[in-house]
Image: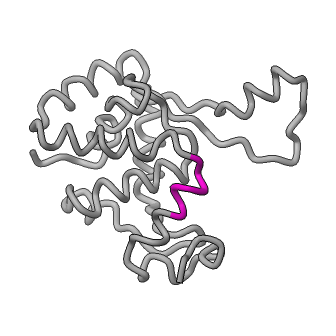
Amino acid sequence: MNISSRKLILALLYAEGKAGEKEPIEGITRMEKLVFLLTNEDFKEVFGELNYKADNYGPFSDRLVDQLENLVDLKLIEKSKGRNLELADEFNYNFTDVKIPDKFSLTFYGEALAKKIFTDLTDEERKKFIDIKEKFNSIPLDALLSYIYNTVPSKYLKNSRIKEKYLKY
C-alpha cells in the first residue's frame, strides 16, 4: 500500500501494543523513534517524505512534528500530558522544573479513520506496525534510545548530544 505520513501515524496509533490494546504513544522522542524504525526499513516512501536528519537526540523529522500538529488540529489525534503528570497529581507533587512529555492518542474520529487505514494494509504491513508498537512503545525511553543508537546508520547520530551515553563502541 502506498501510505502517507499522516496515515502511517494514525495506523501506528491504532496498532495494538504489548498490552494487546491500542496504546497511546508518550513523548515526541518516542514517536519520532517509532516512526523512524517503521519507515527506515519498511515504508521508504514515507521515510523520504519525512526527511529525517541528524539532530541533538538522534534521527529527527520536523515534518513529522508538523504532521502530528496537523492531525491534532484536525481533531484526529489528542495531545495531552503523559503519565508523569498523572503521577504528580496522585502524589500532590508540582513538577515545575520537569518537562512532562506529551501523550498522543486517537480521538473518536481518529480511531474510526485509523481503523479503515489499518484494515486496508496488507497482513504483512499490519504485522510490522504491531511488531514496532509491541517491542518499543512500552519499554523505558533509555532502552529505546540505546536500541536506536546501536542500530541506525551513524549519519543520523553525528549531531547527537547524548550519543556517548547510548553508543556501545
Q: Does 90 sit left or right of 92 as displayed?
A: left
Quick one: 22 or 48, which is closer to the camera? 22
Magenta residues span 140-146
> What residue lies at 24% left-to-right and 62% top-to-bottom?
41
> What residue lies at 61% left-to-right and 30% top-to-bottom?
80
- Count every numbered label the image shows and give the total: 0
Q: Does 60 sit left or right of 92 as displayed?
A: left
Task: Locate residue 165, reporting x and y percent.
Answer: 65, 72
Quick one: 24 or 77, which is closer to the camera? 24
Task: Locate residue 16, reporting x and y percent.
Answer: 34, 29
Q: Does 141 sit left or right of 49 as displayed?
A: right
Quarter of the view holding residue 76: top left
Q: Is residue 142 magenta?
A: yes
> What residue lies at 82% left-to-right and 29% top-to-bottom?
88
Quick one: 76 or 151, which is closer to the camera? 151
Residue extending furthest toward the top: 108
Residue extending furthest toward the front: 169
What colour scheme has been applied to the protein in the rendered image? one colour
Task: Locate residue 32, reporting x and y percent.
Answer: 46, 54
Task: Locate residue 23, reporting x and y percent.
Answer: 45, 28
Q: Tell me if residue 144 comes above or below residue 134 in the rendering.
A: below
Quarter of the view holding residue 113: top left
Q: Is residue 131 magenta?
A: no
